[in-house]
Amino acid sequence: MKVVNSIEQKGIAWFEKIPNLPESARRWLADNAWWLVAGGAVIQAISLVRMMMTILTNLSISEAGYYDVEPFMGTWGLLLQIVAFIFGVVAVGLAAASIDPLKGRMKKGWVLLFLSLLVYVMWIFVNAFLSLSLINFVILVLFHGIFAALFGYLLFEIHGQFAHDRAVKPRKSKK
């Protein structure tokens, strides 16, 4: 958690230098974050079901290669899909776990969303490296990087709207 906290502090330092949304917009985003996240998690879960169907179809078509049928997707493409599916499952799990804490405006919900953002950023770079193509690398990092930056901006805009832990001072023992 120390690594996540240090990344959070760096993010706070980066995002405080850029213009902020009005306070009313930040409050609205914090109040409605839970259902925005729930809607996004449902859409992403539907996408994951579709991705799983595609993976299973590609596996069955690749098995048909034994019968002299040209496989639709190579092994590397199948690996890319499986890696994307695993990252997607983790991201949906984190988003779904953040819904209840977001309703109560607890920091745990914000941290789970932040972890979801970190998983998304890791997926961008892992997928870009595994694509084995400079053009795909640039496109993935550029376009998904824009969405990750936007998500990070909105996430850090509502950072102060959630109950954050305060440092607990050690008690002096009585002798």
Image: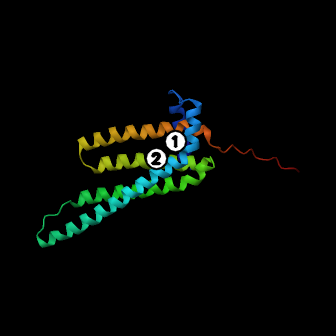
Position in image of residue 87 (x %, y %): 40, 55
Res 2 visible: no
Query: Vertically, is 171 above or below 58?
Result: above
Which residue is more in the foreground, 71 or 5? Answer: 71
Which residue is more in the foreground, 174 or 66? Answer: 66
Position in image of residue 44 (x %, y %): 41, 53
- At horizontal 29% and vertical 51% (from top left) the residue drawn is 130
Looking at the image, residue 1 sits to the left or right of residue 67; the answer is: right
Query: Vertically, is 138 above or below 64?
Result: above
Position in image of residue 53 (x %, y %): 31, 63
Q: Residues within 10 Å of mark 2 (few under 14, many from 20)?
A: some
Q: Which residue position is annotated with label 2? A: 118
Q: For the residue marked with disc 1, what is the amino acid?
A: Ile
Q: For the residue marked with disc 2, what is the amino acid?
A: Leu
- At horizontal 35% and vertical 50% (from top left) the residue drawn is 126
Res 45 visible: yes
* Front label number (2 vs 1): 2
> Extreme right residue here?
175
- At horizontal 66% and vertical 45% (from top left) the residue drawn is 165
Q: Which residue position is annotated with label 1? A: 7
**Alpha-carbon span between mark 2 and mark 1:** 9 Å
Q: How many labels does the image show?
A: 2
Find numbered disc 2 in the image and state the secondary structure of the residue it sits on. Answer: helix
